[in-house]
Image (spheres, helix red, strand yellow):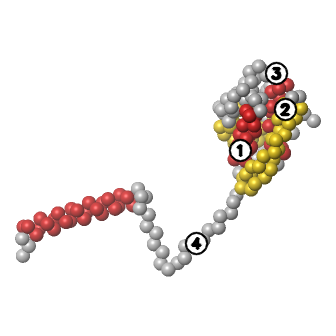
């Protein structure tokens, strides 16, 4: 016969076991514990194929009344938007190093339309010096377009945005896309 003392101990043990089982289920639910059961099968072997390739490109910019170039090595991804973002950020870093612009510009976002013919480059701030002439602003954009063209990006038209809105400028019209080949011959 079960005595009261044994009954209390068995009840206490049941509570403790329930507590630990509850913690175990909670951890499993939160994915802190992952159980992988395989019955004699080999785990699938995955081979990592890099989706990016090293490529040397020329960053073009206008300085001293002539085109300058600097060759860099980049990783070109199969994702065109990611590659465009990387190239544009590297190009703006070069302009910052060369003191062509007096502030650091970064790309917030690069988006492509479904056809891949139109790219939308959104910057974190106005990409020109306020006192720049229309010619200097045009040469900044042309330098970026030359760099993109030399990198082998096939996107044809580019919209330039600041905080996802078209750039407002008195000299240049950014409401319409800029062709990859620019306006200079």
Label 3 element class: loop
- Please say if the residues under marks 3 and 2 sit with CB atoms less than 8 Å apart: no
| Viewer-closest of 71 and 140 | 71
Q: Are marks 1 and 4 in contact (CB under 8 Å)?
A: no
Q: Nearer the viewer, mark 4 or mark 3?
A: 3
Which numbered marker is on residue 134?
none
N-terminal-most mark, 4 or 2: 4
Q: Gap in Å between the C-alphas at discs 4 and 2?
A: 53 Å
On the question of residue 63 being in view, the answer is yes
Q: Residues within 10 Å of mark 2 (few under 14, many from 20)?
A: some
Residue located beneath label 2 in the image = 62
Report the residue marked by disc 1.
Answer: 86
> What x and y, as percent, mark residue 47?
65, 67
Residue picked out by circle 4: 44
Alpha carbon distance from label 2 to label 1:
20 Å
Pointers 4 and 3 in contact (CB under 8 A)?
no
The C terminus sits in image quarter? top right
Between marks 2 and 1 in the image, the one whose residue lies nearer the viewer: 2
- Label 1 Cα neighbours within 10 Å, binned few <14 / some 14-19 / many ≥20: some
Q: Which residue: 66% across, 39% down? A: 109
Q: Residues within 10 Å of mark 4 (few under 14, many from 20)?
A: few
Residue at position x 83%, y 29% in the image: 138
For the residues labelled 4 and 3, the Cα–Cα distance comes to 60 Å
> Is 71 situated above or below 168?
below
Residue 45 in the image: state x and y as whole percent. 60, 71
User: Of circles 3 and 2, which is in front?
Assistant: 2
Badge nearest the viewer, 4 or 2? 2
Residue at 72% x, 26% y: name it: 102
Reading the image, the residue beneath label 3 is 133
Front position in the image: 34 or 102: 102
Residue 9: x, y in percent?
14, 66
């Amino acid at each position: 016969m079960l005595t009261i003392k044994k009954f209390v101990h068995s009840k206490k043990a049941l509570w403790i076991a329930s507590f630990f089982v509850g913690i175990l289920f909670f951890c499993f639910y939160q994915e802190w514990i992952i159980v992988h059961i395989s019955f004699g099968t080999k785990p699938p072997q995955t081979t990592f194929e890099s989706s990016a390739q090293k490529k040397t490109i020329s960053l073009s910019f206008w300085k001293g009344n002539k085109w300058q170039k600097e060759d860099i090595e980049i990783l070109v991804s199969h994702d065109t938007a990611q590659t465009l973002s990387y190239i544009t950020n590297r190009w703006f870093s070069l302009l910052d190093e060369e003191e062509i612009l007096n502030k650091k510009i970064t790309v917030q976002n690069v988006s492509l339309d479904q056809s891949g013919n139109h790219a939308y480059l959104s910057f974190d701030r106005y990409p020109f010096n306020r006192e720049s002439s229309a010619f200097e602003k045009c040469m900044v954009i042309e330098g970026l377009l030359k760099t993109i063209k030399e990198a082998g990006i096939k996107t044809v038209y580019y919209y330039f945005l600041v905080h996802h809105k078209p750039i407002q400028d008195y000299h240049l019209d950014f409401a319409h896309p800029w062709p990859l080949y620019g306006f200079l011959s």
